[in-house]
Image (spheres, helix red, strand yellow):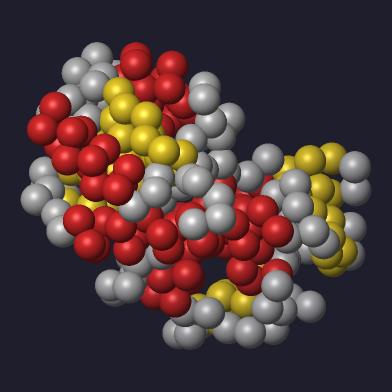
Amino acid sequence: MKHRYKLLVADDEADIVTMLTSFFEGKGYEVMTASDGIETLKQVEKRPDLILLDISMPGLNGLEVCRRVRDHIDCPILFLTAKIEDMDKVKGFSVGGDDYIVKPFSLAELEARVSAHLRRQARHSMETFVKFTGDLTIDFAQRSLFYGKEEIVLSKKEFDIVELLSQNPGQVFDKERIYELVWGYDSEGDSMVVAEHIRRVRTKIAVFTDRSYIETVWGCGYKWIR
């Protein structure tokens, strides 16, 4: 591979860390490791390209680590977990997680998900244009949203939704499609998570203007108003 991606594997199970380190180094990745939440925070300072983050670590758990670092780093974060329920997904996505993989997992599937998230992240980093919609300015390179000169601070996933809809103005996306494109899942979308993120985006924009930019097409989904 042309660019040697740097992965951070954070898990308190030594066998899993050893297995993942050996596997990904064999695939050409540079691998950093951590065995608890505090150590993970220190390793994050070395700016990994992607983090594999165990939820049930001692000290700070994975959710708390993700919450602490998400405002400061943009790399994909994939949670490793022994079990997963819908509310766990909501919690993970609400703190900025990008994906889940359930233990025991297939290394081939994990590698496929890691590669997909890194490709998506690389596409984001190549965006170099700005879109103007009325007084709203979307800077795709900086991943920032402005109303006039005032920045509207969005979370990573909130901006991803704005990016998807605004780059396809007038096109209707249902909740499941938004979920698949933004969160990277091939499985059925979680409409509750999508609706909550769109509600937050609207609330933040409404502080500055009454104009609606994301329109609900009842029974169909959402679209960006041209």
The residue located at (26%, 38%) in the rendering is 21
The residue located at (56%, 55%) in the rendering is 2
Q: Across the whole image, how many numbered discs are drawn on residues?
A: 0
Above/below status of 77 relative to 65: below
197 relative position to 25: left or right? right
- Can residue 99 be seen in the rendering of this structure? no
Above/below status of 134 relative to 87: below
Task: Give the quadrant of residue 19.
Answer: top left
The residue located at (26%, 19%) in the rendering is 36
Image location of residue 217, percent across then percent down? 56, 81
Task: Give the quadrant of residue 132.
Answer: bottom right
Q: Along the line of sight, which residue is nearer the eye, 104 or 70?
A: 104
152 relative position to 203: left or right? right
The residue located at (62%, 62%) in the rendering is 123
74 relative position to 61: left or right? right
Image location of residue 65, percent across then percent down? 37, 26
Q: Along the line of sight, which residue is nearer the eye, 160 or 20?
A: 20
Image location of residue 204, percent across then percent down? 66, 46
Q: Along the line of sight, which residue is nearer the eye, 192 or 60?
A: 60
Image location of residue 16, percent across then percent down? 15, 37
Which image quarter is the C terminus in?
bottom right
194 relative position to 133: left or right? left
- Can residue 13 be seen in the rendering of this structure? yes
Q: Along the line of sight, which residue is nearer the eye, 168 or 221?
A: 168
